[in-house]
Amino acid sequence: MNQRADLHTHTKASDGTCEPAENVRLAKEAGLAAVAITDHDTVAGVPAALAAAASLGIEVIPGVEVSSVGRGQDIHVLGYFVPYEDTAFQERLVSLRETRHERNKLLIGRLQELGIPITLENVYRRKQGTTDKNIGRPHIAEELMELGVVGSINEAFEKYLGREGAAYVNPPRITPQEAITLIKEAGGAAVLAHPGLYDADDLVQELISFGLDGIEVNHPDNDAEQRARYTAWAQEHGLIMTGGSDFHGWRGEEPFHAMLGTHTAPMEAVEQLREVAAKRKGK
């Protein structure tokens, strides 16, 4: 077995297309030693993944990807070894999902103003039958594809849903600093997700100084130059260097963002995250 871990994957609990057990199976097939379940603002997929892992001999790391806004754009902070069974932590995540719901209503309203016949009801119907109706922009992008407005997920984000898109909205959310604090106070390890997406290295450095435990160096949206820069910063500040595919399942026949297991971190990083979280929990 490859002593590596994919530390960034999504399931149907948020905006992925696979059941949690499928992520675990794919990790096993990829020869990984561990996989993290890091759905957006929910830990609902963790128990099913842990149950699936019990018979496959692979470790599942309980995680979450917390949504925040810094300097007018989405900033995501990954939390590892979070208390997924803790009621207070779950309730805090509920409030984050409610903000996401408000964002979706505003976004769809803007799309309607642009003459696009999209409705909140049709987008949310995509999650019927799941345990947690945690709707994200990829679900809206899929609806735009079905309506024939765009030909791909990428086109949906470029034209309408991304930071430069015609329908982009960003209602008030917690700050990245608050997201880091939330994870750390819960007893988890806080890692900045896909820093290469933000085009704001001064903000990345500000968050490092604030108290990040780690930085996601190996991600499909970090180019070689960025990976080298983040590696240097991690070494300089004693941060844990993580990696993950940001797998969301499939959009059509293509994996989105990347196939599970293609971007990973060594198990040494997992042990470092585990140690940080254990100390925080007082274990």
Image (cartoon, grey):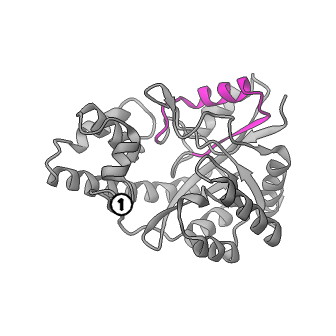
Task: Determine whether, in the image, residue 275 is placed left or right of residue 73.
Answer: right
The reply to whether the magenta stretch includes residue 97 is: no
Residue at left offset 28%, top offset 55%: 107
Where 264 sits versus 228, above or below? above
In which quadrant of the rendered image does the C terminus lie?
bottom right
> For this rendering, which residue is in front, 47 or 117?
117
Q: Please, what is the three-letter code of the amino acid marked with disc 1?
A: Glu
In which quadrant of the rendered image does the N terminus lie?
top right
Res. 135 in view: no
> For this rendering, which residue is in front, 96 or 164?
164
The reply to whether the magenta stretch includes residue 30 is: yes
Q: Name the residue under label 1.
A: 164
Mark 1 packing: few (<14 Cα in 10 Å), some, or many (20+)?
few
Where 141 sits versus 99, above or below? above
Residue at left offset 75%, top offset 68%: 233
Residue at left offset 51%, top offset 37%: 256
Measured as percent of width and height from the top left, residue 264 is found at 73, 42
Tag 1 secondary structure: loop
Residue at left offset 76%, top offset 61%: 231
Q: Give the range drawn in magenta.
A: 15-38
Measured as percent of width and height from the top left, residue 28 is found at 73, 26
> For this rendering, which residue is in front, 234 or 37?
234
